[in-house]
Each structure stands twice: as C-alpha cells, then as structure tokens.
Image (tube, rainbow, N blue to C red):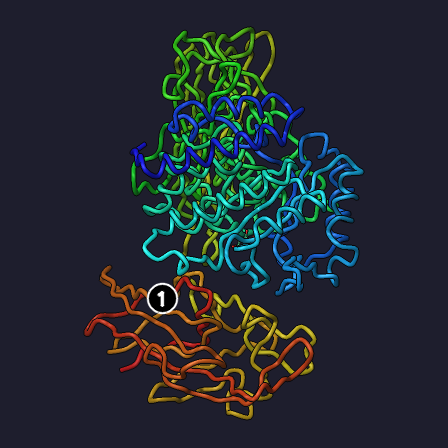
C-alpha cells in the first residue's frame, strides 16, 4: 500500500482520540474495545488493516436492509414484522440480527431546534418505537442518513448536524448507522480532494457517534462514490480507522448482471487487505428470495458474499422467505465462512484467461482453524469444469485433503486437485482441510461435446476422473438428455478408475431440431462407483445452447406494444403497463396487417391482434431476411433514449453494422438518431383505459446503410430493450 504520511498522520491522530473515547464509552463492552485502544498506539499502517475502531462488527454484520426490495415504500410495520419474521424463521439465531431502515424515514427539513424530523406518515410512533420493538425480540436497530446536505432521496442530510443527529440516534436506541454520501459538501472545502473532504466529514460523523457513548456500528458509503479511482484508494487508506464497513460499488439490483458487477467490484485486486475484524468491504444487499435471480444465482450471490466476508443483509420480504431461498441463507456452513473469526476476505487466486468465452474465477479464503474456503465460480452462460489445486488455494503441501461441499455437505478426499463441473452462473464452495480421513475420493464427471446440430447423431465422450488417493471400483456412467433427444446407450460400464486417472465412455446423442431463436438444453451425466466401502455417485452437466435465426420478424415478437382500449391488461410498451391504443392507431391509418408508407419507405404492419406480441424489444434476436438494396428501414419507437447496433449478415458470409435508435414514443425530440415521424396518435392506452396527457404518441422510421450489391441473409437487432421494432424492410 503506498504511503501518504501526511494523510495517515491526520487519520492516526483522529483514531487515537476516538479510540480513547471508544474505550471510555464502551467500558464493560467485550475485549475488542480494549484491543482497539492498544491498536491506536501501534503504527498507522497496521491500524488500517486490523482492529475495530469502536470494538464492534468483529464479524461482518448480518440482518436486513429494506432498500433493494422496497425503496421508499416503507413504514414502521415493515420493520417490526421483519424483526418478527427473522425470529420466527430461525434467522435471528443464525446471526441475522440487524434490522436496518434505509432512506425515506425522515422529512426534507429539520425542526426549529435543528433536529431531524421523522416522517410520521411512515413511522407514526417515531423511530424509538421501532427500536424498542426490535430490542424486545433481541434484535438490533439500524438507521440511515447521509454525510452530505441531503439524503439520496432528497431528505435532510446530516452534514453540519452530526452531533445532534448522533445524540438523537442514541436516544432512539439505534445500533447501526449507514451514512450515505449523496449531495457531498465539496464546495465548502476548496482546494481539497474529494477523498480529503470525505475524510473530514466521515471523521466528524464517526466521532459524533462515539461521543454518544452508545455502541453503534458505522457503515460509510464514501468509497462507493469513487469506485476504483484515485480518490477511492485514498479513501481506503483511512476509512477502516473511522468506521466498520463501507460500500465499495454500485447499488445492487435484482438481476444477475448486477450481482456480477458488485462481485467484481468487491473482489477488485488490492481491496481484500482492507477487510478484517471490525472493518469490512460491503458488496451491498442480498437479493435472495427476490424473483430476478435463479436459485443457482441466489446460491452464488450468497456463496460469493460469504467468501468475500461481506455483510449479509437480506433485502426481501422475510415473512415470505421459505423453501430453497430460505435454505440458502440458513446454511450454517456458508454463514460460518462469512463469519469466520479470522476475518480475512477471500481473494481470486485463479481465473480464466482474459477474454475467455467461458470465464471463471477461483477464490480462496483463509479460515481461523487453518482450513481454506475455496469457491469455484462459473461466470459463463454454459456449464464448465473448473479445476484448481490445493497449492493454488494457498494450502500447505501434504497431498491429502478433505473437501467438504458446504451446500451438498458431501465430504471427499483429494490428493491436491480441487475441481467440479459447475452449472452456468453457479458456484461450488468447499471447505478444504488438511488430511483426508476416510472420505471417498473426490471425482469429476466431464462431458466433451457442445455442438449438437438438430437431427444428427453426435458422439459424446463422458469421463470420470478420480482426484483422490484410492481407486473407484465398478464404475458406470449414464447420460440423460431432455425429452425429444435420443441417447444410446443409456448406461456404460467403465470398470475401475485408478487414482489420478480418468476413464471415458462414449454415447451417441441426437438432438431434435432446435426451435427458432435462443434456447438452451442441459445434458446430465452421472457416475456410480464403489469407494470407501460404499456405492456412491457424482454428476456433471453440459449446457447446449442454440441461437437460430427466426424465419420472420413476427416469430421474434416478444412485447405487446398495441392494445385495445377495452383491454384491462393493455400491453407493456413502456415497461409500466402502457401501450399504443389500437383505436388511436387505426385513426392514424395503422391497422393489423396494413401496408404502410411513410417517409419514402414501405412496410407491412404486424398482423397481430391488439393485445398480442407485435414488436421486438431488444434481446438481439437474429431474423432471416432477403433482398438487396441501399438501406434497411425500420418502423418503431423507444421507451427510452438510446441507440444500439444492428448487424446485417450477407449470403456471402460477410456482415455490416449500423446504429439504430428511435425517438421516445411520446416525450423527447422527435428527430433523435436521424429518425423521422411516421404516424402520430393523440393518446395512449393504460391499465385504466385510454389516456391523453397532452402529448402525442408516435411511430418513427429510421434506416441503416446496406453494403451495395450484396444479398441480405439475416439481421441481428439491437440488444437494448428500450428499442422497439414493429417492422423492417430492405429498400431499393
Ligand atoms: C443510494 C445507496 C442505496 C440507498 C439509496 C437511498 O445512494 O447506495 O443503498 O441507500 O441511496 O436513497
């Protein structure tokens, strides 16, 4: 870590002062407070990586925060009921004990005495009542503010009022403060860098909390606002001296790409050294239980967050959490990795080569008892075998290890290879310890074929590898495929497999003709063998994916843009349940199946009945198309403000690209991206019927160039879902 003596000295002085206060404030609190005071007399450099500034959060906080699931749609009931549910579902016992209120609990202005004012519509009995309810069930109470002039939602910020606010939190029984960093007071500190300003205000807030004498975990959002720039790394140098955890990157959302972004940010090389007992990198909330992630992805987020020693804050309807998602977050073995007392953040120890079509990471986290938690993370959209070694994972040699799969609980024994076939977006988490005991050998089942042209017999080699120190006896492999596929034989004997060796069986597999568009199928291979005196099994899988051109644009339609005014479920052109009105379009001359001319182009309007899918909204489908000409014209509009790439494929195998965008359907410049208005309607259709907001709803034409003299074979449409295409045509 580069040294910046001046800044460190400033931080060190502050830390000494606050640590003394902390020790006084927390007299009688666990020994950690005492060790904080000791830490303050050691070097500044060691204080940035070890010790809790206030004696709290010696393991990453666990509990609930409402923001990702509820935004501002909160009230006191949500938090008291969440507390009840955490207890009722056994989650509180597992460590989920903080119930944190995010933004929107307060008003936009302070009272005459300078105090924050609670939003009494949402919290009619004030904040203390929520805290009291939670405390009565043995839980802890968290709250949100902002170190700037306003919260991110525009309510009164804490800047300039840190002492007053901290005293109020203490009065209300607050145990945890998340201090966000919207509306930063940079202009009050001319000549200072953003990192220096952040240090000033967060130090003030941190000291204000300590001065109250009430132990409060302090979560600081400053780094997230400067992710990976110079200010970010400057902030990292002091932030652990004044707080317990800090968001490092983006706001989490309920989709896989968001989880991947936050994982990538939190596993940024160099960041793990700032994590340790009392001070943690925060990857943001868990999306477990919400609809946007598959179960595999929910397990992966939980596994990765635990491996990264991130806080585990649920952001879902805890009362409704049940079944597999509840099991994921209740997994004591994975929680133990997150909460391991050594407090080391796992790091990436091996990765796929840059630009790989099948990316993966291997992470390793040292644990207090000398074990390592090793995660094999398949980032790819298809299954793959991820393989590493105990040495790469940082385990001392010895050649005999036990792998405990923390999800399936299976224990196996390896001489050094740590591998598994991992589903798309999946993770396998092993707790690896030295010594193999009596467990059966670790094995991997791998499939060696991904290419399955429909209707053609293909040979699929399936292998069973023995990574353990003893043989697999009487092994057999079987392969299963989805309905419609044929596999022969269904089972093949491969005899004994020796340690460090593989045996392979070949299967003949015929796939049915795949459907148009994108689809995936999964082939599953299972092995059965005798080892450690038992008949055991293991499995592997292969993802077969297809991206076949649609034979017509209509076959690719995936969105309802036009609906009848009598329809109570009127499509979803704008993502909010609004669409074009079939009646208003008809008045403009646009009816199902009509030939339309506009701006010199001729199209066929979709023949779909109102209320049926009638346009392509992103997703980059490829559509067969023929003809040659100078331009490819489109009829469409946007529920957004963006342009994106269209790729034209020609019969000679070459391709060309163009940029396509339309103006927003109602609101914005009507000539964006070079488009022109084609048809104008004076109202739209909404879930409550036709609506006229004093604006027009339009359809536009736009076009991209074609390569002269070439025959078009197919077109790949934009990936952006904001861009809606109703019709396209090759123009002379
Ligand atoms: C964001 C923050 C979110 C949430 C929100 C509230 O800046 O990253 O986690 O707190 O503000 O307005």
For residue 702, which quarter of the picture? Answer: bottom left
Where does label 1 land, which residue? 644
Give the percent coordinates (x, y) of residue 389: 39, 19
Residue closer to the observer: 59 or 560: 59
Give the percent coordinates (x, y) of residue 39: 47, 24
Q: Can you say whether 667 is above or below 363 in the image?
A: below
Q: Can you say whether 548 is above or below 614 in the image?
A: above
Q: Residue farthest to the left?
A: 709
Q: Quadrant of the C terminus?
A: bottom left
Give the percent coordinates (x, y) of residue 320: 73, 46
Q: How many marks?
A: 1
In terms of image quarters, where does ligand 1 lie? bottom right
Residue at the spot 44% in from the left edge and 25% down from the top edge: 364
Q: Can you say whether 108 is above or below 94 in the image?
A: below
Can residue 73 be seen here? The reply is yes
Q: Quadrant of the N terminus?
A: top left
Residue closer to the observer: 386 or 332: 332
What secondary structure is marked by label 1? strand
Determine if the C-beta at disc 1 is less than 8 A from ligand 1. Answer: no
- Badge 1: how crowded within 10 Å, few (<14), some, or many (20+)? some
Residue 454 is left or right of residue 58, and the answer is left
Give the percent coordinates (x, y) of residue 355: 30, 43
Residue at the spot 51% in from the left edge and 8% down from the top edge: 436
Residue 588 is left or right of residue 673, and the answer is right
Residue closer to the observer: 123 or 549: 123
Can residue 523 be seen here? The reply is no
């Amino acid at each position: 870590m580069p040294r910046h003596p001046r800044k460190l000295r400033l931080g060190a002085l502050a830390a000494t002062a606050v640590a003394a206060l902390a020790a006084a404030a927390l007299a009688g609190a666990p020994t950690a407070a005492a060790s904080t005071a000791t830490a303050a007399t050691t070097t500044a450099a060691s204080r940035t990586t070890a010790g809790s500034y206030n004696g709290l959060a010696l393991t990453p906080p666990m509990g609930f925060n409402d923001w990702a699931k509820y935004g501002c749609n909160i009230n006191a009931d949500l938090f008291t009921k969440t507390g009840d549910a955490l207890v009722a579902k056994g989650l509180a016992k597992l460590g989920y004990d903080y119930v944190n209120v995010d933004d929107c609990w307060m008003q936009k202005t302070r009272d005459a005495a300078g105090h924050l004012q609670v939003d009494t519509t949402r919290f009619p009995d004030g904040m203390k009542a929520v805290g009291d309810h939670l405390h009565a069930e043995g839980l802890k109470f968290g709250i949100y503010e902002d170190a700037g002039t306003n919260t991110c939602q525009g309510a009164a910020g804490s800047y300039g009022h840190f002492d007053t606010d901290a005293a109020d939190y203490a009065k209300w029984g607050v145990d945890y403060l998340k201090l966000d960093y919207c509306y930063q007071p940079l202009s009050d500190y001319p000549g200072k860098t953003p990192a220096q300003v952040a240090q000033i205000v967060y130090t003030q807030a941190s000291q204000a909390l300590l001065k109250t004498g009430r132990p409060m975990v302090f979560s600081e959002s400053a780094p997230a606002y400067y992710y990976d720039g110079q200010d970010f790394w400057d902030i990292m140098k002091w932030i652990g001296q004044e707080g317990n955890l800090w968001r490092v990157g983006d706001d989490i959302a309920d989709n896989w790409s968001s989880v991947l972004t936050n994982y990538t940010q939190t596993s940024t090389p160099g960041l793990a050294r700032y994590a340790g007992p009392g001070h943690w990198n925060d990857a943001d909330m868990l999306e477990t239980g919400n609809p946007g992630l598959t179960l595999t992805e929910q397990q992966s987020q939980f596994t990765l967050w635990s491996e990264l020693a991130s806080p585990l804050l649920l952001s879902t309807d805890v009362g409704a959490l049940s079944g597999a998602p509840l099991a994921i977050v209740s997994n004591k073995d994975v929680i133990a990795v997150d909460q391991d007392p050594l407090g080391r953040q796992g790091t990436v120890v091996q990765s796929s080569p840059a630009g790989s079509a099948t990316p993966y990471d291997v992470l390793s986290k040292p644990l207090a008892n000398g074990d390592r938690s090793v995660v094999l993370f398949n980032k790819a959209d298809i299954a793959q075998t991820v393989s590493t070694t105990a040495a790469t994972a940082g385990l001392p040699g010895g050649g005999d290890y036990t792998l405990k799969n923390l999800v399936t609980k299976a224990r196996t024994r390896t001489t050094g290879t740590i591998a598994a076939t991992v589903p798309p977006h999946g993770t396998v988490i092993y707790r690896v310890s030295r010594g193999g005991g009596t467990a059966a050998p670790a094995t991997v089942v791998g499939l060696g074929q991904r290419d399955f042209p429909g209707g053609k017999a293909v040979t699929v080699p399936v292998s069973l590898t023995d990574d353990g120190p003893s043989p697999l006896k009487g092994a057999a492999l079987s392969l299963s495929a989805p309905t419609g596929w044929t596999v022969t034989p269904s089972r093949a004997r491969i005899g004994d497999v020796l340690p460090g060796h593989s045996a392979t069986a070949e299967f003949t597999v015929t796939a049915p003709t795949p459907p148009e568009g994108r689809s995936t199928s999964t082939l599953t291979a299972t092995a059965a063998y005798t080892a450690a005196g038992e008949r055991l099994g293991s499995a592997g899988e292969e993802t077969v994916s297809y991206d076949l051109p649609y034979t017509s644009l209509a076959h690719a339609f995936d969105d309802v843009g036009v609906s009848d005014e009598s329809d109570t479920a009127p499509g979803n052109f704008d993502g909010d349940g609004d669409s074009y009105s079939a009646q208003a379009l008809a008045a403009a001359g646009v009816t199902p199946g009509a030939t339309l001319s506009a701006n010199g182009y001729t199209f066929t309007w979709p023949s779909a009945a109102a209320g049926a899918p009638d346009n392509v909204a992103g997703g980059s489908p490829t559509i067969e198309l023929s003809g040659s000409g100078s331009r490819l014209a489109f009829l469409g509009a946007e529920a957004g403000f963006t342009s994106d790439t269209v790729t034209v494929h020609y019969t000679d195998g070459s391709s060309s690209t163009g940029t396509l965008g339309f103006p927003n359907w109602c609101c914005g410049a009507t000539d964006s991206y070079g488009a022109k208005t084609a048809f104008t309607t004076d109202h739209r259709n909404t879930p409550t019927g036709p609506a006229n907001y004093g604006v027009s709803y339009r359809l536009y034409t736009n076009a991209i160039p074609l390569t002269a003299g070439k025959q078009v074979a197919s077109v790949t449409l934009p990936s952006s879902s904001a861009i809606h295409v109703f019709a396209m045509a090759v123009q002379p």
